Image: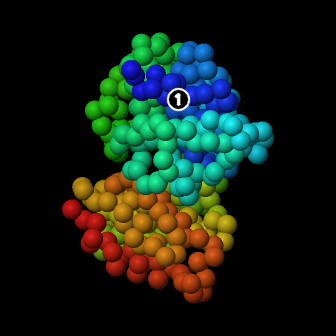
Amino acid sequence: MTKLDELIGLLGEGRVVIQTHNFPDPDAIASAFGLQYLLHVKGIEADIVYCGKFDKVTLQQMVDELGIVIINSEDYDSRADDQVINIDGQKNNANFTDITGYEIACIDHHPWVTNYEYQFVDHRILGACATIITGYFRDNNIELPKNVASALLYAIKVDTQNFTRGVTDADIMAFSELNNTADHKLMLHLDSNDLEINDLRAYGAAINNIHVIGQIGFVHIPFDCPDRLIALVSNFILSLNSVDLSVVYAERGGGLKFSLRSEIEGFRCGDWVHKALEGIGDGGGHPTMAGGIIFPERLSMLGPDPDPIIRERFLASVNEFRP
């Protein structure tokens, strides 16, 4: 029995909903799209639902060009008997809003942090969740349509930063399987339109506000900006030759949203941010990249100028997570 067969065997009579993490990225959208098609082939229709919004123009282009139907939770009539499949994330995480329905399954590639007991779990530490879904096509001998292959390949490229971050043999195998079918002209178009005019404000703030202490680059972006952009700035700071760890954070709803990156072999970014924000927020993620949040109601605990205290908290625990 394949993983897809196992999942289908658990689904009952209720409506099936595939939920991505909030503010979905290409990997979340493509993985949901691929799973939706697989279920359709097996005679099960499913809706893709997300919370938040698209924080990048190229995401809307991806959805439009590939014919992906994805519904904002505010426009979706959720029901108590909906069977919810969480994809590219886990229930009870800060980036996964609880929607009406029963979470029956989870397919994810991030470190496992939830204590929720799903009936079905397919959890693998890979470069992209789309790699798992690509494997479902292979294992069930289901042909990949061009639009699905394009979505999955683009997702793997983005989530692994063009195969330079967190890549596994499974990601390489998935690339090989998707490459001949995908629409490379479309992916080139999406790649070439990756940077938007409004992004320049965040890069400018990073240049003006960077503090480098040892190997760590700290940046406070003093305005609200999307998760995607915070992550891009964190990658940008990591590209400095004197920085091996980057900690970038921006205003978010009265609190602060964090993105961390590491190029130190064996370092544990996810554990580091969780420890540094303990008591005032939460965080987690991969060894090389992670995210976190300081809750709005806790930010006042850091006083009128939180930046020095935030730097102290990260510096105090950094050596615990080195190899």
Task: Residue at 25%, 65% (x, y): give it.
Answer: 322
Q: Is residue 148 above or below residue 82?
A: above
Please say whether residue 169 is visible from this viewpoint.
yes
Task: Tell me the amino acid under the disc marked 1.
Answer: Leu
> Where in the figure is residue 16, as x and y percent of width and height?
64, 31
Residue 168 lies in what quarter of the image? top left
Quarter of the image that includes the N terminus: top left
> Where in the figure is residue 209, as x and y percent of width and height?
51, 73
Q: How many marks?
A: 1
Task: Residue at 39%, 70% (x, y): give it.
Answer: 275
> Where in the figure is residue 240, as x and y percent of width and height?
36, 61
Q: Between residue 196 and residue 220, name the one nearer to us.
A: 220
Q: Between residue 256 and residue 22, name the one nearer to us.
A: 22
Specify whether 202 is left or right of 312: right
Please say whether residue 190 is visible from this viewpoint.
no
Task: Residue at 56%, 22% (x, y): give it.
Answer: 39
Specify whether 38 is left or right of 123: right
Q: Which residue is mark 1?
A: 10
Quarter of the image that includes the C terminus: bottom left
Which residue appears farthest toward the left when viewing the image?
Answer: 323
Secondary structure beneath label 1: helix
> Where in the figure is residue 167, as x and y percent of width and height?
32, 39
